[in-house]
Image (cartoon, coloured by chain):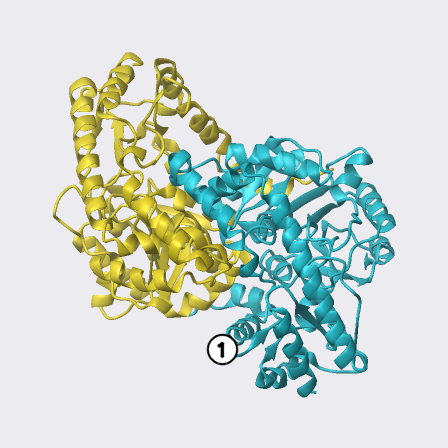
Chain colours: A yellow, B cyan
Amino acid sequence: MSHSSYLAHRIQALQPSAIRELLKHSKMPGVISLAGGIPSSELFDTEGLGIATQKVVAENFNDAFQYGLTEGNQQLRQQLVGLCQERGISTTDDRLLITSGSQQALDLLMRALVNPGDVFVVERPTYLATLQILSLNEAQVKSVGSDEHGMIVDELEALLKTTRIKGVYIVPTFGNPSGATLSASRREKLIKLAEEHHFVIVEDDPYGAISFTEAREKTLLQVATERGSQENVVYTSTFSKILAPGLRVGWIVLPEWMKQKVAIIKQATDLHANSFTQSLVSAYLTLERLNPQIELIREAYKKKCLSLSKHLQQELGEHITFNQPQGGMFLWAAFRYQFDTTRWLQQTLEKGVVYVPGEFFFSDNADKKTLRFSYATATEEQLYDAVQRLKAAL
Amino acid sequence: MSHSSYLAHRIQALQPSAIRELLKHSKMPGVISLAGGIPSSELFDTEGLGIATQKVVAENFNDAFQYGLTEGNQQLRQQLVGLCQERGISTTDDRLLITSGSQQALDLLMRALVNPGDVFVVERPTYLATLQILSLNEAQVKSVGSDEHGMIVDELEALLKTTRIKGVYIVPTFGNPSGATLSASRREKLIKLAEEHHFVIVEDDPYGAISFTEAREKTLLQVATERGSQENVVYTSTFSKILAPGLRVGWIVLPEWMKQKVAIIKQATDLHANSFTQSLVSAYLTLERLNPQIELIREAYKKKCLSLSKHLQQELGEHITFNQPQGGMFLWAAFRYQFDTTRWLQQTLEKGVVYVPGEFFFSDNADKKTLRFSYATATEEQLYDAVQRLKAAL
């Protein structure tokens, strides 16, 4: 029986076995994982989530267990209008669609936007699962460089001189894997380019709320709105990093012209997001515990990030270089000399520590001397040990 | 901004607006809906689901709120091996993948199987959401007829003489919309054809457990296994109809050669099924309440089905004809003379009753005099009133 060919070809680029092996290893006893973008379970609001669960069973039983609307739980969508407002985003509930985490948001959006062969632009480096999704949808992926101020928008402008593009995928704030945040002037310019060249920006914002300072860049959707149009930006975010990923509740703010398309695809894909956990998130939001919970996460991750940075600087500063993250979950580093971080992983694994090699985050021109550390899951003691182990593996 | 073309073309065939309108109407106050395939909320095991929820929060907090494995909760997969065994299906946990309801199972499977232009065969009539998914994946859909014994497999055999097909989609037991069950001899023949012609059968079995008698046809996967191979059948089922649809927990039993492909697509699509409700279902299964719950549903739906059948026969027997369902949620009827049930819907709506016009369940050669009634949601009194209203609309 031959069922190879097409999909096999499409997924070849994904190197999934390598990533899946890595995830397996990261769960081996004694191994400290700086690999996955996994929120710290210790920070979960156990009490609040417990109360919210009780509320669902006591007050919203049928909503939680019955089929729901494709676009999502109506009460939750109204609450999300308020949450978006806190983030400077002005929208209405009919523009919101609730998804099974922001991973599904990206899948739905790319299915709606990408025709085979369409050019989609990503940052170099970018979120690796987006590369998988673009590949599944047969997009032609082009990349533009990034630095400590995020995507180098001038490179995008140069590309647009020769290439018609369908869209740009970007994590503008506390990027994954780069940790970088797009500067205000680049945000302005990116929106202007989207208006001029009629492309769509997919603004993926899972980490924006996890800032280590009081400084805030406007979301791209806010910048676009202030310039007079929301037609070129799709905004997506999630409760995975600020509440709990197992809930699988994310959302999309859609431009008017995409609403119906995305809803139809959502319906065909899985009818609607999980009724129970939508009700659970809605009940949680009524408790007014989300903002204190985000404060807790910000403080904890900031402390962990500073620890990891300090240890890396002290122990490995002559070998690697990195920018100090201002928020989010990731520290992106690079060796100061030619180095293959994918190969090195075998040695660090023997010493009992794993990370994600940088090359997986590139669609092309992979920089093999880069690597991504997540500081979210490990304890401070583990972060210290991890760096010692990395040093011993050199 | 022009974003039309490709997807717009792909979704044109879906007629979603008509269906969405219909669903809206079916929720209007005073309207009795015989439209959606929605389990009766009154039958939910409120107590059992409440206990299971408590157990999750008390005993499995981290599993429920943290990221999980792409293939699904390991304990639940092991429990599903036992549940499959009760259905005559012999499998192992590594062949099981948990999905967001069986709707997502169908989407994942078609994404894994269908290359643009591949021929996929469905019954005439068939589940309309499958037509949507096949359309999104650019399959070439061919249909074969069905009667009171399910798909007419001889028609498929004739088609195979001229056409190379990738797969067959079938709801062999208590079909949607037909209510029909594929006979034993046709099951045997279908499997034999799949072996000879190297195609895949997607066996969609959401209703098999909801039998009104003690008679049981073997699943196609069991028939195939007894013939010596599981390579040609993919089996999918769900907790939506036997426990609660809002949980969005379904599963696939995959042949060895599809396992990795489907897992990769699942991961790109939404990482994994909902952690919380997977834990909830797993906790529920430990309570040993599922089989009594299924008994309750079987009894209740049987009673409702008999009521609806009786009223239809008495009040509309000279106008419509139908086969008596032996299980499931649907009664498929046809006018005895030329009739347009899509147009008629406007009149029945005015009288306060809705159903799904039959034409939506056909990929081609739609039989406009057919219609689907669901008896699951309405009360017995409402079923009586509904038929009176249908009569008044004639």
Q: Position of residue A310 (x, y in %)?
A: 15, 25
Q: In the image shown, does A318 or B56 lie closer to the viewer?
A: B56
Q: Quadrant of the N terminus of chain A?
A: top right
Residue position marked by numbered label 1 in the rendering: B29
Is residue A332 at least partly visible in the picture?
Answer: yes
Q: Secondary structure at mark 1?
A: loop
Farthest residue in the left direction? A214
Chain for disc number 1: B
Q: Residue at x 60, y 44 (%)?
A: B290
Q: Position of residue B220 (x, y in %)?
A: 76, 45
Relative to B281, is A80 on the left or the right? left
Relative to B242, is B325 on the left or the right? right
> In which quadrant of the rendered view does residue A63 lie?
bottom left
**Which residue type does callout 1 highlight?**
Pro
Q: Residue at x 68, y 40 (%)?
A: A3
Residue B42 vertical position relative to residue B237 in the rendered view, above or below: below
Q: Position of residue B139 (x, y in %)?
A: 65, 57
Residue A257 vertical position relative to residue B240 in the rendered view, above or below: below
Q: Residue at x 36, y 19 (%)?
A: A31
> In which quadrant of the rendered view does residue B316 lie?
bottom right
Q: In the image shown, does B348 or A24 lie closer to the viewer?
A: B348
